[in-house]
Image (cartoon, rainbow, N blue to C red):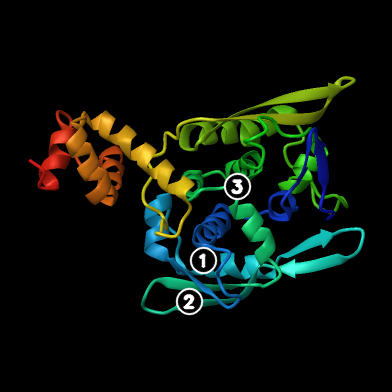
Amino acid sequence: MKSEQITLSPSIRQHNIITTARYDYTACQLDILFYVLAQLKKKDKPNTLYSIQVKEIEDKTGRMWNYQQLRDATADMGSRMFEVESEQSYKQIWMFQKVEYIKGKGSIEVELSNHIRPFLYELKENFTSYQLQSALKLTSKYAKRIYQLASQWKDIGETKFYGIDEFKYMLMLKDPIGKEPEQFQNISQLKARVLDLAVSQINEHTDLHISYELYKTGRAFSDLRFFVRKQTSKQLAVPFFIKSDETNEQDSNKLTIARQHLATLGITQPSLVEQILKEKLDELFNFMYKLKTDKVKADRNPGGLFLKIQGLI
C-alpha cells in the first residue's frame, strides 16, 4: 500500500501506515496494540520488552480474554504484513520480533520489530495516555479504527474525503481483488453496523466528538468524510502508564481532569484541593472510577466519603 500524502493548505499531512493500512484487527488485537502504545517511548532501546498484564487489560476494557484467545490474537498480529511503498522502495514489515507468555503470572512480554517502531512512534503522537484509556473502552472494532483515524485529524477539524470503497478496503469490508464477499453492501447496513455505532461509542467514551456525511455521485453514495472536534472526555481517566518523564502537556491534562473531578465531588476549598492534587492524585482517579462503575456506593455525599477514606476529615 502506498504511503499517501494529502495536501491540506497550508500544510501537508502524511497518514500513518498503521492507521490507513488494510487490515482487520479484532477488538482484542486492537486492545493489545493500544496497550503497547501506552508504554512506548522514543528513548526505548530496540530490544525493549513491553509487558501486558492480562488482569489489568481485562479490568480496563471490562472484557475477558482467555489464554487461547490471546495466543491466537498475538499469533495473527505477528504474522500480518504491513506494506510501505514510496517512489524509492517497497517494504514488507511485521509487528512483533517476539511474544512470550509468562506461565503462572498472567503476563505477556512483547518485543516489537525494529522496522515497525517508527510507524508506532508516529501513531503514538496522536494520543495521550488518557486517550488510549478511552480507546480501550470502545467495544466495536470499527469504533477503535475510526477513533484512530479521527485522532489524526483532530487539529484540522475534518478528514479528507474517503471513497466508500477506499474506506471499506481499510476496514477489510471489501476485498480489492474480489476474492472475498463484500460486507454491508447496502448503505443503510454500513451506517447502522459501522458508522453510526462508531460515532455513538466515540462520542460517549472519548475526548473526540465526531460526525460524518455521505456524498453521492449521481444516484449512488460514493464518498464520506468525518468531522472532528475535541470535547471533555466523558470517560473517567484512570492513571495509565503516566510516568514522571511524560510530557508537561499530559501532566497538565491530568491535573485539569482532576480539578473537574473535585468540582463534581463538591470539594472546592483551595488548600484541600491543592493537597489532593499534590498527594492524592492517583487515589482520586481510582475513587472516581470505582464511583462510576458502582464499585463504591455514595449516593448522598461522595466527596465526603472520598475525604474520609483518605483521612482528610
Q: Nearer the viewer, mark 2 or mark 1?
A: 2
- Residue under label 3: 126
Residue kind at label 1, given as amino acid type: Leu
Pick whichever, 93 or 48, lies toward us. 48
> Any mark on residue 70, and which?
1
Instruction: Give the secondary structure at mark 3.
Output: loop
Pick whichever, 204 or 254, lies toward us. 254
In which quadrant of the rendered view does residue 104 lie? bottom left
Q: Nearer the viewer, mark 1 or mark 3?
A: 3
In which quadrant of the rendered view does residue 48 lie? bottom right
Pick whichever, 44 or 77, lies toward us. 44
**Does residue 133 appear in this view?**
no
Residue 2 coordinates in the image, percent (x, y): 85, 54
Residue kind at label 2, given as amino acid type: Tyr
In which quadrant of the rendered view does residue 276 lie? top left
C-alpha separation, residue under disc 1 versus residue under disc 3: 26 Å
- Sooner in the amino-acid sequence: mark 3 or mark 2: 2
Mark 2, residues whose alpha carbon is within 10 Å: few (<14), some, or many (≥20)?
some
In the figure, is residue 8 to the left or right of 301? right
Instruction: Give the secondary structure at mark 1.
Output: helix
Residue kind at label 3, given as amino acid type: Asn
Q: Residue at x 64, y 59 (%)?
A: 120
- Sooner in the amino-acid sequence: mark 2 or mark 1: 1
Instruction: Give the secondary structure at mark 2.
Output: strand
- Residue under label 2: 101
Residue 266 coordinates in the image, percent (x, y): 21, 28
Locate the N terminus and report the quarter of the image it occupies: bottom right
Q: Residue at x 18, y 38 (%)?
A: 272
